[in-house]
Image (tube, grey):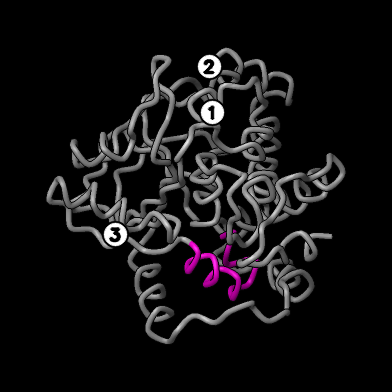
Amino acid sequence: MFKRLLQQRPGKQATDRISRGKRIYLGALGRMMGNALREQGRTGRTPRRLHLLDRVLTPKTSPPYHLSAETHKQISKTMEQTNYWHGTGRYQYRDGKVADVLEYIASHRELQPSLDPFEVSGQMQSLSLARVRIYARAYADLHRNTAIPAERYGTSAFWSAAFLADYALEAARSEGGLRQVMKRLQQNGKDEWHAKVNQRPLSVFSTFAAGSDIPGNYPILFGVHTVSELPTSPAIAIHEVRTGEPVKLDSQVTHVEVPRAYIEETEKVLAGHAIALPVYALEDFEQYAAMLPTSRLMS
């Protein structure tokens, strides 16, 4: 099942409709991966089940198109320089109006911390970053319009189920049960979190499937080289980091990814503020991801 879901290859419009049974299955696999990563952190050795995951689950089919040697080299080099990823989008709802997030980021030349409702130890004023690209891409895709065909290696609903299930179960283990975790997150404002991209009443998972209802919105992924990390709960720490300081575009960001159709538009906004960052096609990075072992995508 995992292999069939993951083989929604770039070049095809992928659906985000994943049934409850499939979410449970993906969640179990995400939990296995999370536990393996924690073991790897404790022992310094790669657990055998990570090798098994790659042998059994990583798709063996050929990609629909091949990256040029030059593009493959450029992406490899960029990935080596990048340690964290932050997913956002062009537009969000703020104070009942549509705000141009990219213009705001460019004019301030930094990614700024905001209130985080998902830290179970309590609300934090912080900037969230993922330790792996594919997880941050799911957050960036919250801003996509689902009516527009997307070239993705697994949908945002797919990857959110795999990563967030591990987060929820680890938080439940350390915080006294899943009900306690959900109560605390509701108090922190998780139920209002989706409203920044979609005005319909949605659950967290449904938001990943629904995307944004803002016309002209599109996902943006920032690669980041280094940040000063804040202490977080064990549930957060395995897949994400938090920083309480702004991330400077000029010195800490390695590159920007957007859908190919929006590269020129994004470059124009950055150039308007004399920001010289490479802007790459998100679809090419998805194609690169399709060539990697599953364990590397998730660890």
Mark earlier in primary sequence (2, 1): 1
| Residue 49 position (above or below residue 171) | below
Q: Which residue is drawn at 59% across and 73% down?
A: 292
Residue 296 on the magenta segment: yes
Contact flag, marks 2 and 1 (Cβ < 8 Å): yes
Q: Which amino acid does label 2 sit on?
A: Asn
Identify which residue is drawn at 53% across, 44% down: 144
Residue found 66% across the figure and 40% down from its top: 209
| Callout 1: SS | loop
**Counting residues from the N terminus, which is met first, the one under dot 3 or under dot 2?**
2
Mark 2, residue position: 188
- Label 1, on which residue? 118
**Residue at the left extreme?**
274
Which residue matches tag 3?
254
The quadrant the N terminus occupies is: bottom right
Q: What residue type is labelled 1?
A: Phe
Q: In this picture, is 293 found above or below 257?
A: below
Q: Is the magenta stretch mostly helix, strand or loop?
A: helix
Q: Quadrant of residue 108?
A: top left
- Tag 1 near tag 3, CB within 8 Å: no
Q: Provide residue 83's location: percent of width, then percent of height.
A: 38, 58
Give the crowd class for mark 2: few <14, some 14-19, many >=20 residues within 10 Å: many
246 lies above or below 87? above
Residue 63 in magenta? no
Q: Which residues are drawn in magenta?
A: 283-299
